Image (tube, rainbow, N blue to C red):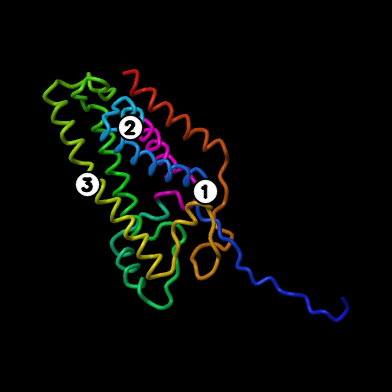
Amino acid sequence: MEGTTPQLDTTPAKQRVWDLPTRLTHWLFVVGVAFSWWSAEEGQMQWHVWSGLTLLGLLVFRIYWGFAGTETARFSSFIKGPRAVAAYIGKLFKPNYRAAFGHNPLGALSVIALLLALIFQVGLGLFATDTSYVASGPLNHMVDSDTADAVTDLHEDFFNVLFVLIGLHLAAIAFYLIAKRTNLISPMLTGSRRAENVEGPPAGIAPVPLWRLAIGIVLAVGAVWLVTTL
């Protein structure tokens, strides 16, 4: 209609933060760890072994994706030194705080700790023995019985460490949601967030060629195949 003032779109633009492979890997880790715990508790050891092998494939893919993936998935983008961590903590409670583009330097410590703990836990499981003789780790035959028993005990006990790290990770998510009004869960589900008061390019991450993803999948599947055929 003549003389009508056009309405401006005030909806904040979306910033792409996480790619689909990173998000799928993240949530499959959640499901895989939970299922591994359940299957061990219920004595479903064959399922426990397959769950561990799935976690192995996910770890191989995530490590590869930490070098070949999109910007926020790469280790080089979020692993920082002590000075960067201290500087981030210093500005965390300031009024001009801005959400980091991807993992912040403090959160990166949690991510790396969880990845290392999972590598250690899954690695132990490969050599562990099943006292019910239903299904042992695929590399159990490479070690003697005393070593297998010791590895199995450590595999069971170390889950408590993993459990504590997961608890700290969840506590950090709750802190950002309550204290900083920053929802870290939604972007990990959708891949995007509102591009306001945040760091990084407004549009977010750039796509990477599909052949990089294909290589990661081949490496993950190949690693699982290798440990089951040795």
Write down the quadrant of residue 46 in the picture: top left
Question: Relative to residue 33, is residue 199 drawn left or right?
Answer: right
CA gap between label 2 and label 3 equals 17 Å
Q: Mark 2 sits on what residue?
A: 52
For the stretch drawn in magenta, the main secondary structure is helix
Q: Secondary structure at mark 3?
A: helix
Badge 3 vs badge 1, beta-carbon distance below 8 Å: no
Rendered residue at 52%/38% (across/down): 212
Q: Mark 1 sits on what residue?
A: 19
Bounds of the magenta segment: 53-75
Between marks 2 and 1 in the image, the one whose residue lies nearer the viewer: 2
Residue projecting furthest to the right: 2
Residue projecting furthest to the bottom: 3
CA gap between label 2 and label 1 equals 24 Å
Q: Position of residue 128 (x, y in %)?
A: 22, 28
Rendered residue at 82%/79% (across/down): 4
Write down the quadrant of residue 93 in the picture: bottom left
Q: Position of residue 7 (x, y in %)?
A: 74, 75
Q: Secondary structure at mark 1?
A: loop
Q: Give whichever of discs 2 and 3 has the lower sequence position.
A: 2
Indicate which disc residue 161 carries.
3
CA gap between label 3 and label 1 equals 29 Å
Q: Amino acid at mark 2?
A: Gly
